[in-house]
């Protein structure tokens, strides 16, 4: 309100001053005489001022007309002028609007509309570094991979868009299944952008699939240097790669380099079960049994595993069953209550024909974790102690449909593997296998149900010795109720 009042007062004051000035000029004597072609013009003081103002305005208009004429001539000549800049701004405005509409169409899943808007933006802007990516992605959305490939190749020729072009072609090759070309493109893309995490992961995955362990270890080091991988994860995966480079098995014919790589893998990640087993075999091949035992004990203390038990048994292959039970007691002391410790010791005691101790060692594993292995061991113990065939068959019937227990399972796709591998054979993920029980039972329950009457039926007269566990026959002719078998087992 005050500001508006102030403006009104200033305006009134200016009008008053102009009126006062005009009045003074009108009262002032004299003037200006102008002679034009013999004609004299006499102007008073006020008229002279008005004439001067008009002259100044005319000169200003004349100079502007001259400037416009010069600008027009330059425009026609192709030079940059205010006029050309005006038209350029109009085209630029239309181009950016088309680019914005194309991005919105792309985000909305309208591929054809995005292509049309991208072509319009390219026409107005003439900036391929802005429009090429939109054109390529719109072409991919509509299934025109050929056009997308052409645009990506054009982007490779431009220094500012080279990485985007290489990455786009790499993704196309991956979708086509051409992993060899994709691997080379991933290496080139990583050279252009070493800190790009997606390219790092893609290259590492492709190198692992191609079994390029040395190259994969280099890529892993790059991830560590750029900060995209924690150091503890780096050590674990570097151990996996070193283990993979050592080979699946280290035997008498293994090279010294393979043995050293196996030992290095265990040094990098002592809790990696395959690395510990492989390093132990490498030491056994060198005749260093004490080193092998130390590695296996250390790994067993972290995670008991059948592969570790197998490697520990191979340290003394000629020992008797009783000697092996005594030697394995060193491992049992490290994890005495672990299910794997109980199962391994029970197996060894069964081989040593110490069935009561095997039952005591197995404890309640078959109740807490009733998998096929534990139930089969119970059947072997019952057979060794002289139980009836019905009792043995009852345990075997339960083992038939029971889960198989912990296995190598991919954490990404949950695919079950018979042996450990650095890369999942189903989803090609790197370092995703873990020793755990599958989420779902892998045994076909319907098939097992049909076989139950055969297993729990009456057996013919046994022809083998009672202590010979491996000769258990499951050939039955007449079914016996499962409840009766289990009742007899519980009474036993």
Image (cartoon, rainbow, N blue to C red):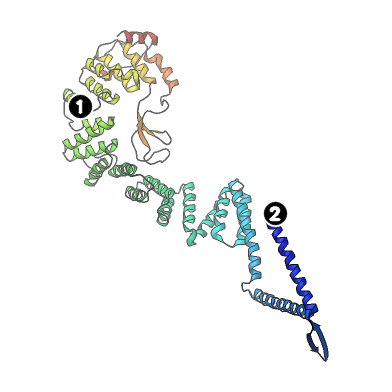
Q: Quadrant of residue 85?
A: bottom right
Image coords of residue 143 (percent x, y): 57, 48
Q: Nearest the camera: 6 or 431? A: 6
Task: Give the residue displayed 71% in from the left and 58% down from the top.
Answer: 5
Please tell me whether residue 443 is drawn above or below residue 229 in the rendered image: above
User: Considering only order in the chain, which callout, 2 or 1, is on the residue closer to the N terminus?
Assistant: 2
Question: Residue 463 in the image: x percent, y percent?
Answer: 26, 13
Q: As drawn, is 264 to the left or to the right of 123?
A: left
Q: Nearer the viewer, mark 1 or mark 2?
A: 2
Characterize the local packing of mark 1: few (<14), some (14-19) or many (20 or more) Cα atoms within 10 angstroms.
some
Instruction: Give the residue at x 41% y 51%.
Output: 183
Query: In the rendered image, which quarter contains the N terminus?
Result: bottom right
Q: Is residue 187 above or below residue 473?
A: below
Tell me if residue 403 comes above or below residue 388 in the rendering. Answer: below
Q: Quadrant of the C terminus?
A: top left
Residue at 57% in and 54% down: 135
Q: Badge 2 is on which residue?
A: 1
The numbered mark at residue 328 is 1
């Amino acid at each position: 309100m005050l500001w508006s009042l102030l403006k009104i007062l200033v305006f009134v004051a200016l009008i008053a001053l102009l009126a006062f000035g005009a009045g003074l000029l009108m009262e002032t004597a004299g003037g200006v005489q102008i002679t034009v072609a013999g004609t004299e013009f006499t102007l008073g003081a006020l008229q002279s001022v008005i004439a001067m103002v008009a002259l100044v305005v005319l000169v200003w208009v004349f100079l502007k007309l001259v400037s416009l004429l010069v600008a027009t001539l330059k425009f026609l000549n192709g030079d940059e002028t205010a006029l050309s800049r005006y038209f350029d701004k109009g085209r630029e405005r239309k181009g950016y609007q088309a680019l914005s509409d194309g991005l919105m169409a792309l985000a909305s899943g309208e591929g054809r509309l995005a292509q049309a808007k991208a072509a319009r933006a390219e026409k107005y802007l003439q900036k391929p570094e802005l429009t090429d990516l939109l054109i390529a992605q719109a072409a991919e959305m509509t299934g025109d991979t050929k056009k997308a490939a052409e645009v990506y190749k054009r982007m490779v020729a431009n220094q500012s868009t080279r990485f985007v072009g290489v990455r786009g072609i790499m993704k196309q090759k991956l979708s086509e299944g051409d992993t060899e070309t994709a691997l080379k493109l991933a290496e080139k893309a990583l050279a252009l952008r070493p800190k790009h995490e997606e390219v790092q992961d893609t290259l590492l995955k492709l190198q692992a699939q191609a079994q390029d362990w040395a190259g994969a270890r280099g890529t892993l080091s790059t991830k560590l240097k750029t900060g995209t991988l924690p150091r503890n994860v780096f050590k674990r995966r570097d151990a996996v790669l070193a283990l993979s480079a050592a080979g699946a098995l280290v035997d008498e014919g293994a090279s010294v380099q393979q043995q050293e790589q196996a030992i290095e893998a265990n040094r990098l990640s002592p809790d990696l079960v395959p690395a510990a087993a492989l390093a132990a075999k490498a030491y056994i091949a060198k005749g260093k049994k004490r080193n092998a035992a130390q590695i296996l004990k250390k790994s067993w203390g972290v995670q008991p595993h059948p592969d570790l038990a197998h490697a520990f048994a191979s340290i003394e292959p000629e020992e008797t069953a009783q000697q092996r039970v005594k030697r394995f007691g060193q491992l049992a002391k490290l994890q005495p209550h672990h299910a794997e410790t109980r199962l391994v010791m029970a197996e060894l005691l069964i081989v040593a024909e110490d069935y009561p101790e095997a039952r005591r060692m197995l404890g309640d594993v078959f109740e807490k974790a009733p998998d096929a292995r534990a139930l089969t061991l119970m059947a072997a113990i019952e057979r060794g102690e002289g139980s009836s065939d019905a009792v043995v068959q009852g345990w075997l019937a339960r083992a038939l449909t029971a889960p198989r227990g912990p296995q190598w399972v991919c954490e990404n796709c949950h695919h079950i593997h018979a042996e450990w591998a650095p890369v999942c054979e189903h989803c090609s993920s790197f370092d995703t296998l873990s020793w755990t029980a599958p989420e779902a039972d892998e045994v076909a329950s319907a098939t097992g149900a049909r076989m139950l009457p055969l297993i729990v039926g009456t057996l013919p007269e046994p022809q083998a010795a009672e202590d010979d566990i491996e000769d258990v026959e499951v050939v039955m002719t007449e079914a016996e109720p499962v409840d009766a078998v289990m009742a007899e087992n519980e009474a036993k």
